[in-house]
Amino acid sequence: MTDRLKVAVLVSGHGSNLQALIDACQNPGFPAHIVQVISNVRGAFGIQRALKAGIPYSVIDHRKFENRTDFESRLNDELESCGAELVCLAGFMRLLTGSFVEKWQGRLVNVHPSLLPAFKGLDTHARALAAGVKIAGCTIHYVSQDMDAGPIIAQAAVPVLPNDSEDTLAARILQQEHIIFPVALKMIAERRVKIEDGRVLIDGISLDDAVLISPILN
Ligand code: GRF
């Protein structure tokens, strides 16, 4: 397929979401392909995944930079030189400054392990359990200036089960992340996703079955 959307994926750790995106992009009919994987952590397992898939990768260790601006300027150079049209944050554990976000506005998406706007930030699973919510989940969203607050593209819900620990809940949610991230990427790459008044429309409407996964409760 020609004209596939060029995607850069940013990771900090295990990279299972990266793997889901790699697997989706390996389908020749998929409308996006990964041109570069970038990690801010040397030794992140995500790098091994890129290597195995034959995808160019680079490590930009944030600790080697005096400040966030210098780190992001290097990151920006790397993204521009690989020709990325969209940047996927897939377990990328660095907050990005307003000026970086502004530069990539509308071209920067993130996966967050909660049903936003609930449980922004870290420790989402522990907080969901402590709050006693009955349904948890994950969100794919555009990144905006405010943390975990940009327009929502796709969400998947899972039940919270009576004996859940942080780990069991996280694993159930992660499975869904691996489903909705490629779905959202596909729709963006097919240019079906638009932002209007801070909300995402797909094919001009606010809901499409593919971007809503909810549990069957019985
Ligand atoms: C995922 O749960 C993601 O939502 C969160 O960090 C985790 C990363 O997992 N931001 P992986 O590195 O993709 O396996």
Image: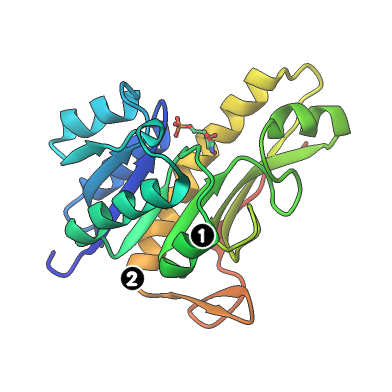
- Specify the amino acid type for callout 1: Ala
Q: Secondary structure at mark 1?
A: helix
Visible residue check, residue 61: yes
Q: Secondary structure at mark 2?
A: loop
Disc 2 residue crowd, few under 14, some 14–19, many 20+, Cα 10 Å? some
Q: Can you identify the residue that label 1 sits on?
A: 210
Q: CA distance from mark 1 to mark 2?
A: 14 Å
Q: Position of residue 134 (x, y in %)?
A: 82, 37
Q: Is residue 79 left or right of residue 88?
A: left
By what rule are the colours in the image chosen?
rainbow
Check if mark 1's residue and mark 2's residue have beta carbons within 8 Å.
no
Q: State which tag comes first along the sequence, 1 or 2.
A: 2
Toward which corner of the image does residue 31 lie, by quadrant?
bottom left
Q: Residue at x 30, y 38 (%)?
A: 60
Q: Residue at x 25, y 56 (%)?
A: 77
> Residue 6 has which mark?
none
Q: Position of residue 61 (x, y in %)?
A: 34, 33
Q: Position of residue 118 (x, y in %)?
A: 76, 48
Q: Residue at x 20, y 45 (%)?
A: 26
Disc 1 residue crowd, few under 14, some 14–19, many 20+, Cα 10 Å? few
Q: Can you identify the residue that label 2 sits on?
A: 190
Q: Nearer the viewer, mark 1 or mark 2?
A: 2
Q: Is residue 96 left or right of residue 39?
A: right
